[in-house]
Image (tube, rainbow, N blue to C red):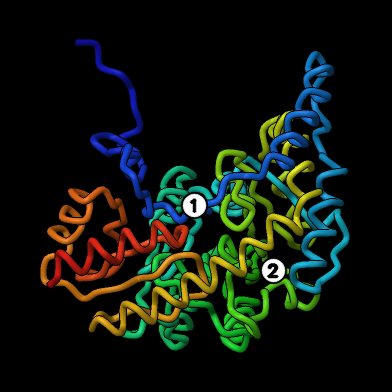
Amino acid sequence: MTRLPVRADLAGLEPYGAPQLDVPVRLNVNENPYAPSPDVVDDIARSVARAAAGLNRYPDRDFSELRAALADYLAAESGVRLDPALIWAANGSNEVMTQILQAFGGPGRTVVSFAPTYSMYHEYARDTSTRWVQGSRRADHCLDLEEVERILRAERPSVVLLASPNNPTGTSLPVEDQRRVLDLAAGTGPLVDGGPSASLVVVDEAYGEFRRDGVPSALELLADHPHLVVSRTMSKAFGMAGLRLGYMACDRRIIDAVMLVRLPYHLSAVTQAAALAALRHRDELMAQVAGLRAERDGLVDWLRSKGFDALDSDANFVLFGRFDDRDAVFRALLDRGVLIRVVGPDGWLRVSVGTPEETRAFTTALEEITA
């Protein structure tokens, strides 16, 4: 058999991907359980049809209209008004993260995060040939600021990845902790032209819209911290996982660097048209978020009432346990048509927030298994 020159660090690895199984209740990948309304679908269809009439031309590579619409949305959602020039979008927040590491990582550079956290982060590092260093969190899964300081001073990373709310724990990073990390990171980057640089701090707010009342967005810190990046997505709260639209807000110099590594015309005209249509219906789509928050909080209360540990969550999922054999519980739930996720610390499982009917199916099955 002909040998192929695949990169040595990729040999024998399996591609990332949560199970996609045809079961009645899918609560494993933190999707919004509510499909777009007929009005939203009609607007997207009309918008895509208009875009299709011009598909012989390349799309607006700077997607100015979309950036302005995202700025309007963030102002309404977080209370922070940004210049559209400080917003950048790509095909999912995965591509946003990869572009950041293409521009600021690479051979000889280091990216740092703290486990447990999103399992894709180390793959972004691997894919961009950036050295990966993973610190640990406290026993309560919150960030250990002493550990953060130790690792940043020792490793001098070019990028620090912090999810808030964190996946899989659902915990948000307190704003005072974010300020502490940002102040520290202002001088812990790699040497550039003989002097220290800043470590880029990426606060991943993929689940930011689900945060509880009184929990601020990291967007409030952007004006005073030019080395801060806040990443968002339309996959979760907007219920547009199939659209693949992620975006970030940051200093213009960071966007200028990312533009050097982005592929030409990376955001298609169809994607831009569909995203703009969805943003026109932001009030309707965001109205679902309050119901999902209530469903989440009720699920946490139910789990605790049954004797399980369940973490307070600012996301649309709950980490719960503890189980001597979590794989057996996962399989037993799957046998009953309920798919959740084996992820995070040993002994814990993660369940996405679904419709009330899906939540009842999950709680009924879990009671049967653990009776």
Residue 347 rendering spot, x and y as whole percentages: 20, 70
Vertical placement of residue 66 versus 344, above or below: above
Q: Amino acid at mark 2?
A: His
Q: Quadrant of the N terminus?
A: top left
- Residue 310 appears in which quarter of the rendering? bottom left
Helix, strand or loop at label 1? It is loop
Q: Is residue 118 above or below residue 13?
A: below
Residue sitting at x 57%, y 55%: 236
Residue 65 position in % (x across, y down): 87, 43
Side of 291 relative to 113 (left or right): right
**Image side of residue 281 versus residue 212, left or right:** right
Residue 323 appears in the picture as rendered: yes
- Going by the numbered disc 1, the residue's amino acid type is Glu
Residue drawn 18% across the image and 48% down it? 335
Circle 1 residue: 31
Q: Is residue 201 in view from this perspective? A: no
